[in-house]
Image (tube, helix red, strand yellow):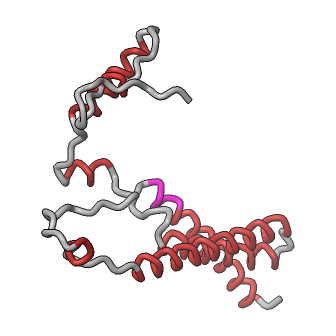
Amino acid sequence: MSAAAQILITLAGWTGAISAVVAYGLVTMQRISPDSLLFQGLNIVGAGLLSVSASVHSAWPSAVVNVIWVAIGVYAVRALWNARRTAAAVVVPDDASELTGSAPAETTTALSVDSSPEEVLATGWEAPASSVADHDLLMDSLFAGTDVVDPASHLVSERNSATRTPVAA
C-alpha cells in the first residue's frame, strides 16, 4: 500500500473515531437529541470510517461491529424519516368546529410526547389539585407502612354524590 493510501486510511480512522466521540459527547451534554438526524449521521459516518480503517488493518472484530453500527444507524434514520413523513401527512384543521359542528374551543398549546418537564412548566400547565392530593395520599400510605389507600375510593362522582368504590378485578 502506498504512503498516500496509508495516510488516507489513517485519517479515515481518526475522523470516524472523532465523529463517534463527538456524537456521544453532544448527546451526553444534551446539546442534541439521540433521535436527531445529526446524532445518527455522526454515528453512521463515524462507524463507516472506522470499519474501513479496521478492515484495512485486519481488525475484523472491530470492522464487523462497526458495520453493524452503521446498519443500526441506517435503520434509525429510516425510522426517523418514516415518523416525520407520517407526522407531516396528518392534517389537523385549525378550527375543530369543522369536524364537530360546535363552537371552536379555546386555543391550547400542543406539547409533544418528548416535551421536557421544563417545557411543560413553561406553558403554565399544572396538575389538577385532586390528582396531586391523590398522589400524596397514595405515597403517604405506601411509605407509612399502612394499608394502601385507593385514591379512587375518595373521589366523588359528578353524576351523583355517591362515593366511588373500587371495582374488584
Instruction: Locate residue 30, reporting x and y percent.
Output: 41, 56
- Residue at position x 40%, y 15% in the image: 141
- Name the magenta segment's main secondary structure: helix
- The reply to whether residue 33 is in sight is yes
Instruction: Locate residue 18, reporting x and y percent.
Output: 57, 68
- Residue at position x 75%, y 84% in the image: 6
Residue 70 falls left or right of residue 122? right
Taking the magenta stretch, the answer to whether it contains residue 7 is: no
Residue 126 falls left or right of residue 77? left
- The reply to whether residue 14 is in sight is no
Quadrant holding the C terminus? top right
> Where 78 sits versus 39, above or below?
below
Please tell me which residue lies in front, 60 or 123: 123
> Where 69 sits versus 131, above or below?
below
Q: Quadrant of residue 137?
A: top left
Q: Quadrant of residue 48?
A: bottom right
Please tell me which residue lies in front, 56 or 128: 128
Instruction: Locate residue 37, reporting x and y percent.
Output: 49, 74
- Residue at position x 52%, y 65% in the image: 23
Instruction: Locate residue 138, reporting x and y percent.
Output: 38, 22
- Residue at position x 31%, y 27% in the image: 134
Q: How many marks?
A: 0
Taking the magenta stretch, the answer to whether it contains residue 26 is: yes
Residue 160 falls left or right of residue 43? left
What segment is highlighted magenta in the picture? 24-28
Please tell me which residue lies in front, 54 or 164: 164
Please tell me which residue lies in front, 41 or 144: 144
Quadrant holding the N terminus? bottom right
> Where 146 sits versus 23, above or below?
above
